[in-house]
Amino acid sequence: MKKTMTIKRFLFMALVLSLVNSVTGVSAIVVDFDDLNYDMHLSGTEYAGLTWETGNIGYKNNQGYWKVPSSFNSYPQSQPYNAINAWGCTHLGISFPTEVDVLGAYFAAQGANDSWTTGIQVHGYRGGLEVVATPWFDDIDTHPDWFAMNLNNVDRIVIESIPVDQGGGWYGMDDLTYIPEPTTLLLFGLGTLVLLRKHRL
Ligand SMILES: [Ca+2]
Ligand SMILES: [Ca+2]
């Protein structure tokens, strides 16, 4: 009995602490791809707790998807890896498990200089509807630069690129940075609390 009480108290305190943290200071999450390997497919995986979607049809009617490229002509911000839109597909999404604020990511060229895109725009979705979009970002070259997206309260983003070569417009993305939206976390935490109380844990 006493042991059960201790466990209950521990769980409760852990919950309260996580709630407090979610309200007062949620730290940014950076997805850097550096724990992966060359030529890995990301689409269809839940890497870093996110859903890496399949894209549209890119270069020469090939199915687009997220991948870690080979080392050839790729320009990561954090070494050694980044992620690219395979076949240069021009619409490629990432889904988040809760609402998030997407701060941005580093973007660079990928491949030969007649195949990387001349610009990207990122669309933000919530509950299946597009709710916000960034301006176009055209600093796509062999030096990765930060694209401040500032897409708040979204649960999905789709990166659109301008096609430059037979339906393809390649880019490399690195250090995707987002913050779980505090209200969502708080509601999730409160829901858990209610459930725990119902089950008299
Ligand atoms: Ca990296
Ligand atoms: Ca640049």
Image: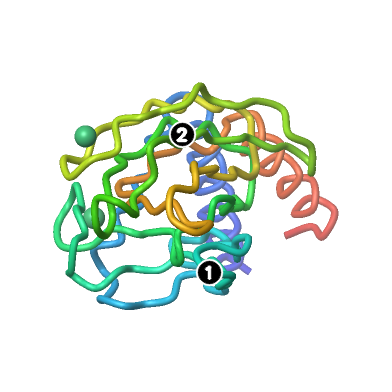
Q: Residues within 10 Å of mark 1 (few under 14, many from 20)?
A: few
User: Which is more toward the observer, 177 or 85?
Assistant: 85
| Ligand number 1: quarter of image | bottom left
Q: Secondary structure at mark 1?
A: helix
Q: Along the line of sight, which residue is nearer the eye, 115 or 156?
A: 115
In primary-sequence order, the first of circles 2 and 1 is 2
Expressed as whole percent of the image width and height from the top left, the position of residue 18 reads 50, 42
Residue drawn at point x = 50 percent, y = 21 percent: 135
Q: Amino acid at mark 1?
A: Lys
Q: Is residue 132 left or right of residue 40?
A: right
Q: Is mark 2 within 8 Å of ligand 1?
A: no
Compared with residue 113, is residue 73 higher up or lower down, i.e. above or below? below
Q: Nearer the viewer, residue 50 or 132?
A: 132
Label 2 or label 1, whichever lies nearer to me, is: 1
Q: Indicate the quadrant containing the C terminus: top left, top right, bottom left or bottom right.
A: bottom right
Percent position of residue 175, x then y? 30, 46
Instruction: Indicate the position of residue 118 as horizontal and vertical percent values.
Output: 38, 37
Compared to residue 128, the image places residue 32 above or below, namely below
Identified at 82% across, 60% down, the residue is: 199
Q: Position of residue 114 (x, y in %)?
A: 30, 51
Give the amino acid type for the residue marked by disc 2 in the picture. Answer: Asn
Is residue 61 shown left or right of residue 171?
A: right
Queried on whether the Cβ of the residue with tag 1 lies below 8 angstroms from ligand 2, the answer reads: no
Q: Return the residue at label 2.
A: 21
Residue found 56% across the figure and 55% down from its top: 11
Residue 182 figure quarter: top right
- Left/right placement of residue 133 relative to residue 201 reads left
Residue 60: image tag: 1
Name the quadrant containing residue 106: top left
Residue lying at the far right in this picture: please name it. 198
